[in-house]
Each structure stands twice: as C-alpha cells, then as structure tokens.
Image: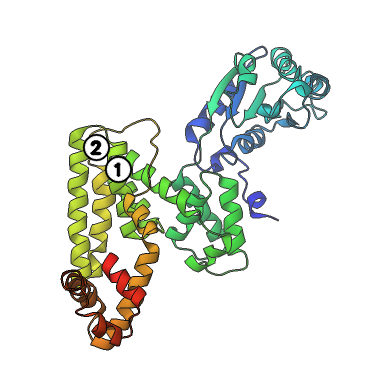
Amino acid sequence: MPWVDKYEPESLEDFSGQKKQINKLKDWYGNWGPGDDALLMHGPPGSGKTTSVYALANDRNLEIFEVNASDNRNKKDIENLAGSASQQMSLMGREKIILIDEVDGLSGNKDRGGVSAIIEVIKESKFPVVLTANDAYESKLRSLRRYCELVDFGKVHLSSMTANLARICEEEGVEAERKILKRIARKSSGDMRSAINDLEAVARGQEKITKEDLEALGFRDREKEIFEVLKVVFKTMTAKTAKDMADDSEKDPDELFWWIEQNVPNEYKKEMDVADAFEKLSKADLFKTRIRRRQNWSLMKYYIALMSAGVALAKKEKYGGFTRYQPPQRLKRYGKSKGKRKAMEDIHGKLVNELHVSSSKMKMEYIPLMKWIMKKQEGSVEGLMKSYGLSEEDLEQIRDF
C-alpha cells in the first residue's frame, strides 16, 4: 500500500497542522442545520481539504457522498448525483455529508448551469454540504461564495510536515536526520501528499536515508530555493527561523550572502532598517575574511547567523506585500567575465609551475606587477614571459584583465 494511503489520517485528531481550519470544520458541522450555508474549503493541493472531510466522517460515523465537479461538470450531472444524494437518507440509516470536490474545475460554456445546480443543492439539502477548491476567488464562483462559509487551508506548515514525516519514518523503522526530513518537506512547498510520496521514494526498503539519497528526487530547483530562503529571511521576525532556513539551504554561503546583500534595499523600506541590515552584513563579511585567512571554519556559524538572523531582526516590523528579488550584480559580472577568468586561471597554472610560487601570490602580486610593467615598458618582459610558455593571446589576456 502506498504510504500516502497507509498514513492518511483516519481521525481529525491525527491531522498534522491546519489546527484552526480543523476547528472551523468541526464548529461548522456541529452547528449546521438544513438551509444553512455550505462550507467551502480552499487552498493548494495536498493541504488536507478532502482528507479532513473523510476524517470528520470517520469520527462521526457519517456516510460520505462525493462528487467531483471536474468530472461531473454540468447542471444535469450535478442534479442527478449530488441533488439526489442530498435528499435521500443513507441505505444504512446513517447521517450523511455531501462532498463536492474541485468546484473551481467548472469552466466555460460546457459547464453552464453547474454553479447554479450546486447552489440549489446547498439550499435544498437535508445534509451538510462541503465544497473544495484550489482558488475560491475565481470570478466564476462569485455567486456560489454567497452561499458558503469559507475556510482557507493554506500550505501545511514546515514543522508540522517534518513531524509527520518523522512519525512515518519511526513507524517504518527508517532512520533519518531531522535536517533531511526538513529538506523533503520544504521541497514539497506545503503539499503533504507530495512530501510523503517523496519520502517513500527514497526511504522504502532502507534502514537509513542520507543527503545523497535525496538526489534521486532530482532534488531541488536552485533558483526557486533561493527565493524561498530570501522570503523567509526578509519576512520572518524570528532569528531561529531565518538561521535554520539558511543552514538548510544548499546555496554556497558566499552566494547566499550576495543575494541577501543585493535585495535588502528591495525589501526594507525604512532607512534605519536598511542601515542595520547592512551593519549585520558588514560584520558577517568580517567573519568571512577571518575564515579565509585563518582557515578557521568553526566561525562559519557566525557568518551564516549574521547574514540570516541578523538581517531578519534588523527590521522593526514585518513588511507585507510581494517583493521581486533580483540576482546579485556580482553574479552577473562573474557570468560576463567567465571566459576571461578561465583564461587567467590557465595562465596562473603555467606561471605557478615555472616560478614556484603559490597561486594566491601569483594572483595578488606577480600578475598585477607584470601588467604594470607591460603597460609602462612595452616589450620589456614579453620575451621572458613567452619563455615561461605564455602565448601572445595569454599576454593580451594579462594586459586586458
């Protein structure tokens, strides 16, 4: 049996996350009477909308009658199915709940009358009616919303997803670090079904899952991930949340630093918030320098904490709205100069072997000196440098770099 079915909540008490939404569902059902509004649960796939209705039915020993509005799209279909079910008692004499799934799947002339038929079901039903939709605010559902109480099932919170994945691993006897499970949860973007499927893909038949196992998932879209990191760092008011996000990121810390540095002015609007954020980044940069000079990698935790938690707490209040994050200008420059840098690396390799000096000394001292001499005294060192195996193209690269 697939894990997504094996570990589907059978009771509302077993639900991971969505506590407020589950309480609204229970309150609505407990207070419902004939003629009352339906419940329209909306949110992204995998957020628990349909599963919660089945869990409620199990808790209350209800018969559940489900119609998928995407499959049964016109007035006649809905009247024949949901309309009849909403009037007739269960064959076993049990109470019933009507579930009309994916009502935003109705569209166009083909589905003409579908919305009006659902409204009639709601108005005439002898049993509670629940509707689900990914987007409840589509214009085609405007008239339907007037007959519904709305409950927003947002993405499942990362901590709830991680805890559920850990519970599944314990049940299956699979060892997994919390950081690994967080990465699986984060990849699914709030979709619990997707997270469980991904976990099963890497964990079934295993005693332990590692970071390398995640590569089987084609693990991440790097561009998407950096935007998720930036959103958390800039929007959260909690130091631990920001630092954990940066720690879990697969981005090179220096590259992450450049992204944050580039986008502080895009996100923060108050001058003092911007100034405080750049002060934290300047301190982070000091730690980066110490790490490189002393090769003291134990300082990395301070570097990451300052660029993430430090910047997150630099703002006095959370900024709302959408921010279009921009790639670092430094990366753009690196992209444009990639060919030149590769050529210079080849030149460094030739000269390092001939002159028996370190690569850093060659880069920081010898090349600038050679470039200066070539500029001031043309022809004075070309012959010597060619004896080191440099071509005319190599000399041009040094002049232009």
Which type of secondary structure does the marked residue at label 1 adopt?
Answer: loop
The quarter holding residue 41 reads top right
In the image, is 30 to the left or to the right of 275?
right
Q: Amino acid at mark 1?
A: Thr
Q: Closer to us: mark 2 or mark 1? A: 2
Q: Position of residue 101 (x, y in %)?
A: 69, 31
Q: Quadrant of the C terminus?
A: bottom left
Check disc 2 and report the residue beneath it. 315
* Residue 376 shows up from this direction: yes
Check disc 1 and report the residue beneath it. 238
Is 348 situated above or below 98?
below
Going 23% across and 52% down the picture, which residue do you hit?
Answer: 306
Q: Amino acid at mark 2?
A: Lys
In-front residue for pair 220/192: 220
* Residue 163 shows up from this direction: no
Q: Earlier in the sequence, mark 2 or mark 1?
A: 1
Q: Position of residue 252 (x, y in %)?
A: 36, 60
